[in-house]
Amino acid sequence: MNSTFIRLWDVLEIMESMDCHGKPVRFQLKFVTANRSTKEGGDIIEMKNAQKCSVRTKQGKEIFAIKKSVPTNDRVTKDPHHWINSTRNILLPNGQKRTVHIRLIIEFNNKKVCY
């Protein structure tokens, strides 16, 4: 495959990966907005130096690892059903959280996303 393109599956694997300190990796992301309820969207949003959000338990402890490794006594406060909804929560450097629909990602780390 051409080096200017990246598959969505590879994008999701990179988003889930951790750096050497056990924190989520940082990445650049460009996606299209869409809102079915208000029928608005079409804006292109670019996020630089973003990372995947950690999950917090009811006790407030952050969990960076994938959901399968979460102990049963550490329940997540609310399950966002990312797999069903095809979404991911992204944390920006200023602390703001955004939910991104993965099928609306058009560019990842300066590479075009293909499906």
Image: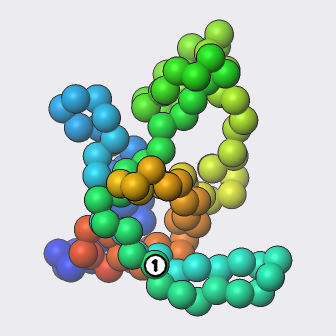
Image position of 103 with respect to 9: above or below: below
Q: Quadrant of residue 112?
A: bottom left
The residue positioned farthest toward the top in the image shown: 73
Measuring 26% from the left and 75% from the top, which residue is drawn there?
111
Name the one closer to the observer, 7 or 87.
87
Q: How is the image coloured?
A: rainbow
Q: Does the image show residue 91? A: no
Residue 80 placement (x, y as % from top left):
69, 45
* For residue 87, side relative to residue 109 (left or right): right
Measuring 69% from the left and 46% from the top, which residue is drawn there?
81
Residue 38 placement (x, y as % from top left):
80, 82
The quadrant of the image that shows the C terminus is bottom left
- Looking at the rendered structure, the secondary structure element under dot 1 is strand
* For residue 8, side relative to residue 68 (left or right): left
Image position of 19 with respect to 42: above or below: above
Total numbered circles: 1
Q: Does the image show residue 30? A: yes
Measuring 64% from the left and 86% from the top, which residue is drawn there?
41
Residue 6 placement (x, y as % from top left):
30, 70
The quadrant of the image that shows the N terminus is bottom left
Name the one closer to the observer, 23 or 102.
23
Mark 1 surroundings within 10 Å by alpha-carbon count, few (fewer than 14), some (14 through 19), many (20 or more): few
Q: Which residue is mark 1?
A: 45
Image position of 50 with respect to 81: above or below: below
Residue 88 placement (x, y as % from top left):
54, 54
